[in-house]
Image (cartoon, rainbow, N blue to C red):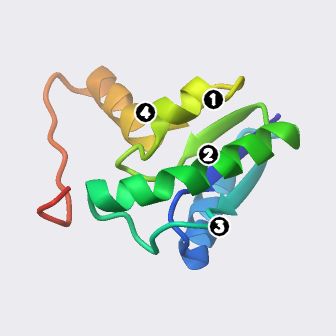
Amino acid sequence: MQILVVNPNTTASMTETIAAAARLVAAAGTEIVAVTSSMGPVSIEGYYDEALAVPGLLVEIAAGERSGAQAAIIACFDDTGLDAARAMANIPVIGICEASLAVGSFIAQRFTVVTTTERS
């Protein structure tokens, strides 16, 4: 199985870190293809940055789907462009925030999310 992991910002070093983490937990036989958005902000710090990141994210998901990806993961805790990506793609698209919250709800009845910026 090929899973596309998209970093919706333009920081390649962050994509490398994300790719390494994904490969550590991927099942045997799963290929992780990690890509950095070719356009948008270097960091996503709020709604404005998110809006600028969505076009590049959608380009990468469409390209990954054409190249054979069977699922896509948006590697941004804001789940940048998740609804738009799901509307466009014919493969499952998962956001890391939504996935984390779902897992958290299975583990504990209550939990909290702590962010590093006030805007988030």
Check residue 7 in the rendering and tell me which mark sits there, or answer none. Answer: none
- Residue at the spot x=51%, y=33% of the render? 84
Point out the image quarter for the N terminus: top right
Rounded to the nearest angstrom, the CA distance separating label 3 from label 4 is 25 Å
Q: Position of residue 71 (x, y in %)?
A: 70, 33
Rounded to the nearest angstrom, the CA distance separating label 2 from label 4 is 19 Å
Q: Position of residue 38 (x, y in %)?
A: 65, 67
Q: Earlier in the sequence, mark 3 or mark 1?
A: 3
Q: Which residue is mark 1?
A: 88
Rounded to the nearest angstrom, the CA distance separating label 4 from label 1 is 20 Å
Rounded to the nearest angstrom, the CA distance separating label 2 from label 3 is 11 Å
Describe the element under mark 2 as helix, strand or loop. Answer: helix
| Dot 1 alpha-carbon crowd within 10 angstroms: few under 14, some 14 to 19, many 20 or more | few
Q: Which residue is mark 4?
A: 99
Q: Earlier in the sequence, mark 2 or mark 4?
A: 2
Rounded to the nearest angstrom, the CA distance separating label 3 from label 1 is 18 Å
- Residue at the spot x=64%, y=64% of the render? 20
- Asked if residue 6 can be seen in this view, the reply is yes
Q: Is residue 46 left or right of residue 28?
A: left
Q: Which residue is mark 2?
A: 58
| Dot 3 alpha-carbon crowd within 10 angstroms: few under 14, some 14 to 19, many 20 or more | some
Q: Earlier in the sequence, mark 2 or mark 3?
A: 3
Q: Which residue is mark 3?
A: 38
- Asked if residue 29 can be seen in this view, the reply is no
